Each structure stands twice: as C-alpha cells, then as structure tokens.
Amino acid sequence: MKNGVRHSLATALLAVVLIANADPAPLPTYRQDVTGFVSAKGERALLMGYPGALEIWAYPLQLASDFQLRFRVQGTVAPIEAAPLLRRVDRSPNEVVRTYVGADFVVRERLFVPRQQAGAILRYEVEGKPDVQIEASFRPSLNLMWPAALGGRSVSWDATRSGYVEREPLHGFSATISSRETVAHDDAINLARAPLERYAMLLAPRAGGDGVRSASLVLALDPSAETDGAQNIRDSETAARRDAATHSAAVLAESIAIETPDPAVNRALASAALALDAAWACNDRIGCGVVGGYGPSRPDRRPQYAWFFAGDGLVVMEGMLAAGQFDRARQELAFVTRYQDPRTGMIWHEMSQSAGLIDWVGKYHYMYVHVDITFQYLAAVARYVETTGDVAFARRNWPAIAAAWRYCMSVIDRDTGIPTIPAGKQGQNEQEDLRDDIRLSSLWIDAADGYASLAGALQKPALVKTAAAAATRARRAIADNGWDDANGFWLSGHRRDGTPVLSQRPDAIGVLDQRVVSDARAARVLNRIASPDFLTDWGVRSLAASDPQYDPNLYSAGSVWALGSATVATTAYRQHRPQTGWAIWRAMVDSDTLDSAGHLHEVLAGDTYRPEFESVPEQSWSSAGLMIAAVRGVFGLSVFPAENRVRLAPHLPAEWDAIRLRNVRIGDRRVGLAIKRDAKGMTLTIDNPGDALTVAFAPVIPLGASLTGAVVEARPVTIKAVSTGQDNHAEITIDARARGQTTARIMYDGGVTVAPVRRPASIGDRSHNPILTSVSEYPDGLGLDAWVSQAAGGAFTLATDRVPSVGSGATIDRIRDGFYRITVAPGTGQTGSISGYDRHKVMMTFKP
C-alpha cells in the first residue's frame, strides 16, 4: 500500500513539474454538428449516444439506456420533446454541453463523467421562462456487458436517496439514479398489465449561489447495497471536475506538442493525444487497459468497442510512443502480457468487460483466435524498448516474449518459411478462411526483426542469429512467391486448397519498407495506390474499386479505414511519395469533425464521404493512426535513446513554412525542434535540456534545387544530397550542445514545388480533388502523372523562381511572383479513366 501511495504522489508531482516547465497548451474545443455522437468518459464509467438517446455504463454494467429528455412548461399540457430543440453542441476533453432552445427558454445540458468514479452527472441549467421543468426518462438496465447477462433485477424508489435504486441480489450489484431536484417520479409498481419498461423523473431547477437555475441527475454504481454511490459522486463533483481538468492538462504537457501554421492540424493532433488517454478503462475484475473505442450499443448491451482488444491496444500503444506517453504505453504492454495464453504463448484477441464474471476462455471462442496478434506483440515490444530505452521491461518480461516467439515459430511452414494459419484460427483477414495471408507474412518479418532486436539488447547472440535468419528467409519467400506481377501487386494470400487470392488490398503496404521488393515493383504498387482506384478525398479504400468484390458499404471490401489510411500515408512518406502521404493524412485531419468531434471514425464509406453503417464513431486506433502517421510520416521523427540520437526527416507540405515540435521524448529528456523555411533554405533550432545529442536532419527540399551549403552554429558542415526520384532531400549531422540551444541551416537555390489544390470533402460528397500520382524530373522540365475529376477538373499550385509553361491539356496562370496555378479542364483525359477520374500527363518546361 505504501508503494502505491508513493507511486501516486510521484505521478502527481510529475504532472505538476511538466505543466510548470512547458508552455501551457490550450485544451482543444469544438462546436460540433448537433446530429453527431457525443460521449463523456472516465476510467470507470461512460456516458454516450446520438441525439435523442443516451446510455450510461459503470464497467462492466450498463446502468441505463434510451435516456431521453422532455421539457414541461406551465400553460402547456403536452410535454415538449427536447431532441428537436437541440441547437448547439460544444465539446471539450472533460465535458459535453448540449444547448436546447425553446420559444422562450434555453436549457444547457452538461454531461460529465468523473475520471476515477463509477458514475455520471447530467446537469441542466435553465434560462428564460422561470417554470421550465426537466423530464428525464430512461430504461433501467443494471446488466452486464455482452455476452454475459443478469437476472432477478429489481427497481424501486428510495425517498431518502430521491431516486431509483436498481438491485441484483446474486452478485450484490446495486446502482442509484437520483436527483435532489426531483418533484415527481413514476412509481415502480408491479403492474399485472403493461408493466413499466421505462421510468421518468421530473426535475424542478433551483437557483443556486451563482444565480443559475439548475438541476442535476446522477447515475452511479453503488459501492455496496447500503451505500448511495450517487451521493458520493454528488459530494465530490467539484473535486472531480478539478481532477479532470488537471489530468487533461497533464496529458498534453506530457505528450509531444505539434505546432504548425494550420490550426486544424494542431487541434486534431492535440485531440488525438487526449483520445489515446481516454481509451484507458479500468475494471475491478480484469484490470486497466486500452479499449477499442466508443459507440452506441448493439443488441445485447454490446457497446462498440468499449472492451479490451490486444491488437487494438498494441496499435494504440504505438500511438502513445509516437505521442511520448511512455508510462501509459508500458502499462498497456504489461496488460496485454498479463493475459497471454500460459499453455501456448499466444497473445489474446479480445475480452469483454464481463469476462471476469464468466468462463470467458472456456466457453467462448473470442480469447485466443487471432494468430497475427502474437506476431504484432513481438514487434510492438521491440518498438517500445527501442523508443523508450526501457530494456528492463524486456528483461522482466523475457519469459513471455520467449513464449510468444515459440508460438510464432510453431505456425511457420517449414517448406515456405512463412506463417500458416491453423484451422479454426484467423489471420489479419477475418473475411476469408486462408492458409496464409500477406499481412501475416509481413508481420512475421516485423516479429523476427523485433525478437532479434530484443535478444540483442539482452546479449543473447544465438537468438539474434536465429531470428535474423528467419526474417531473411521470410523476405525471400515473399519476394519469390508472394507477388502477382501480372497486376503489379502482392498476392493477398492462399486459400486452404492453395488457390492464390488476387484481391488488391493496400493493408500490406508495409512490405515496401521491409527490403522485400525491388524499387520497380514498389514504384508500380505506389502508383496503383495513388490512383482513384484506391484513393478517395477522405482516405484509402480497403479494396480496389475495380475488384469484382468491391462494395463501398462493406466493412472490409471497399470501405475506407482510418487506420489503413494512416498506414498507407506513413509508408508513402517513408517511400518518398509525399504528395500521396499528404493527401491522405490531411484528409484524416478533416474527418475529426465528421461526427464525434475530436475523434475519428473506424470506417467510412468507399463511394461518398459518410460513416460506413457499422462504423464506431470513436475508434481508438484511428486516433493512434493519425498520431503515428504525423510523427513517423509527415515529420519523419525517430528517436534512439540508447544511442543518444534523433533522426528528423520532415516532408513539409507546400503550404507550411514553419513547424515546432515540443516535448520530443528522448529517454527522460524532452527536446524542442523548430524548423523555419524560406526561399533560400531551412533553419533548424534544437533546444536540448540534457546531455549532448546527435541529430540527423534530412528535410525534403524543392525538386531540382541546388545545394549551396550548410552550417551549424555558423560553422560549415558536410551536406549530402539525396534524390529518390520523387523528392529530394538534404542531410546533415548536428552535434547538439548539452543543456542549450543549437541552430543549423541548410541552404539551396532554385527548385520547384508542386501540389494539388484540395478542397475538404463535405458529408455526402463524392471525390473531386486531383490526385498527383508521381512526378518526373527532366532537364529544364517536370512531368506530372495526375488524375483529375471528370466532373470538376483539377488544379495544382507551382512554386518556382523560373518562368514555367505547360503543354496541351492544361493552362497556367501567375498568382504572384514565383507562384503559379496549373488548371486541367474536366473531360480532357489522355491515358485512361477510373472511378469518374481521367488520367493526365502534364508536361512543364522552365526558362530562367
């Protein structure tokens, strides 16, 4: 107990220090569409829903569902439905405020969930007509999360609590739903006919010390049948609100802070950092870990996806690493490790919040079903150790790591060197019964590389050699037998009978970063993906639109996954296709206002901009994907604390001239990195509070630019030019001084920057933005391989210090000195059409 207290005090002191030593980051706020999903979350409770019906959970129990409001006004017999009066929704990390506007009154509904208590507070503030009363009705539940269930529940009115008490005698569960402002309520009586399915309470707001007329309704799990949990929450509301605000500020103070010229980007990334923290849920019988997401319950009290998934958790853990949330990342890895199958070493797939009350492993088939997660686990642990330098974690958990490795080895085909999916198990692709799939084979390379890295960190050279050999063999197997050269794509896998699966899915794009395929094969794949067959204005389709199985509304057969889009964007940047990466990633930023503001949907439709009908509005790994693609992709940031080294290879988009990264975690220190770009070069300022640091700085520079030199603290240094064919980089090595500031500058002349002109999609839109597939440099010229909407045409911006001209099929207009607009008219495609787009080859020449 003393150790726990000491740890809590240390955590609190750390939060204070972080806030004191960082520029205060404003909490992101949104004014969201009134039709959108809302949620208020703590670690032990959840309040959520779309307009017209909320549900309240105190894990693992649903306390109430179908919560609705009506207003009663003197002089009007019929109650007034609240839903049609909803005019405004304001979101902040700690509270949702919904504003209802009647003919002569306004009601503000404040939704709040304490961070560490099992309940929720709904506060109603009334302005205008003095006699407005609040009618709150709901369906009592007190039932377990899917797939468990309770019987023998009862509901009764308790006058001393001024509320309803729900009870379940077998397990002793009890919950209170109460308001001190109640003036009337439905009697909980045992009717022989038409028994009550929902209950209503009438609340009369009262003027408080602040002069505001208000009423509060509290729903809470009782610590015991004799204890009023709602009153406990009511008594500690002020402290709970203060705790929530302090915690949110501490999360932002701990996380990487990204400042760009684009306020929407800054807000979305701050929201993503907070969303990663909000995915943390605690359950007395299971423990604390990351849940998959938050969305309305499906039948049988199945809230999508407010239970535990190891695979989702590992992705979110990677997002936490990108955000610098190292402590929580370690806790999530420990949680995943805790439930590893002790017999086989397999990592688990999912656990309902009710798993601690039923025989989850013995009587249900959900726990150990996904083969791929064990491979993912090894790669994730290696990433954690590399990023944090926490070798002690690997040492403590080596038995679990070694057991996971043995499980992976047990499913490797001796003849092919790649994993085989055992009968009754699943790989990455849940929709088909496959013998092997390319995503799993790619994960095997990551797992083997990761295991080799971990073994090396623990001085186990024999295991390093074994794992490295396995990774090499898997690379060779994919290169030799995993490719469909006729279509220029990888094979998705093989069915049980050995038949190859030729469906073109982008989810295995990571093989391009694994030294598996030739540059020519990689270029062909990247060009295919950067086409309207895959790209939409809101992300990347999960299956090519030209595939016979494509359906834009199916979960995994043509819809647009946020995580899949983030993965493609990250790889596009690593493969030096910044035009592709930026188009995808910036569209993801826009989608954080599509529905539940500050969060990203799980899946969008593949044909028009809208949520796919099964999608979860607050998917945890979607927020993780946005953060990962920003840090590893857009900014090209990698940290190596064991070597006291950082690599920064940013691909700044054309519209940004400056960025600032604060709180970049390198071990225990937090470094600042600021870039400013002008027409003649780029300046990097490093604020380093710790020991001397080596920084490899390799920013993208304009195509065709001539390097004129580089300096660190005004001293010339060696500069290296790197041309990838699709972009150009300049690289220098900086020895950043200890406990001080270091400035470096890369200088260049000339060059060309080109970018599509994009317009954010509005809900219901089809894609219309131009797609820049690739660029080709020629002497005194540049070629664009682009796709342009048949309906809308397309435009590109061009920045150059020379005089440009374009060939047939396009026009060029000067915007101002050094800046031009290239316009391609609709319906003038030259080399093919796909999904309402025409392909164009735009040729430009330049004169001094």
Image: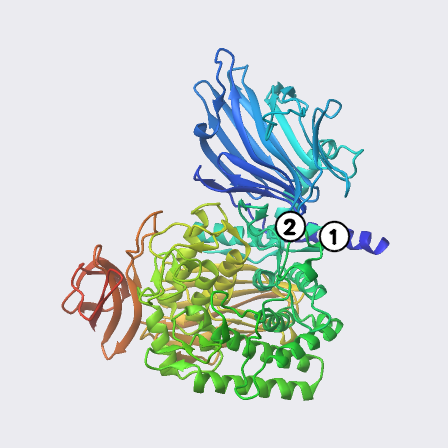
Q: Is residue 311 left or right of residue 60?
A: left
Tag of residue 106: none
Q: Is residue 133 left or right of residue 227?
A: left
Q: Height in image: 224 above or below 185? A: below
**How crowded is the residue under tag 2: few (<14 C-alpha within 10 Å), some, or many (20+)?**
many
Residue drawn at point x = 49 percent, y = 14 percent: 77
- Pair 1/2: label in front: 1
Tag of residue 285: 1
The residue that label 2 is drawn on is 250
Question: In which quarter of the view is residue 746 placed?
Answer: bottom left
What's the CA distance linking mark 1 and mark 2?
A: 28 Å
Q: Estimate the x, y position of residue 112 in percent, counting from the top left.
A: 61, 37
Residue drawn at point x = 50 percent, y = 54 percent: 269
Q: Nearer the viewer, residue 5 or 605?
A: 605
Q: Estimate the x, y position of residue 469 in percent, counting from the top left.
A: 58, 88
Q: Estimate the x, y position of residue 437 in percent, counting from the top left.
A: 49, 75
Q: Height in image: 295 above or below 482? A: above
Residue 805 in view, yes or no: yes
Question: In which quarter of the view is residue 689 placed?
Answer: bottom right
Q: Height in image: 711 above or below 133? A: below
Q: Amino acid at mark 2?
A: Ala
Residue drawn at point x = 53 percent, y = 45 percent: 296
Q: Secondary structure at mark 1?
A: loop
Identify the mark nearer the N-term, 1 or 2.
2
Q: Secondary structure at mark 2?
A: helix
Determine the residue located farthest toward the right in the rendered image.
2
Report the quarter where the C terminus lies: bottom left
Question: In which quarter of the view is residue 803 placed?
Answer: bottom left
Q: Amino acid at mark 1?
A: Arg
Determine the residue located farthest toward the front in the rendered image.
192
Q: Say whether marks 1 and 2 touch (CB < 8 Å).
A: no
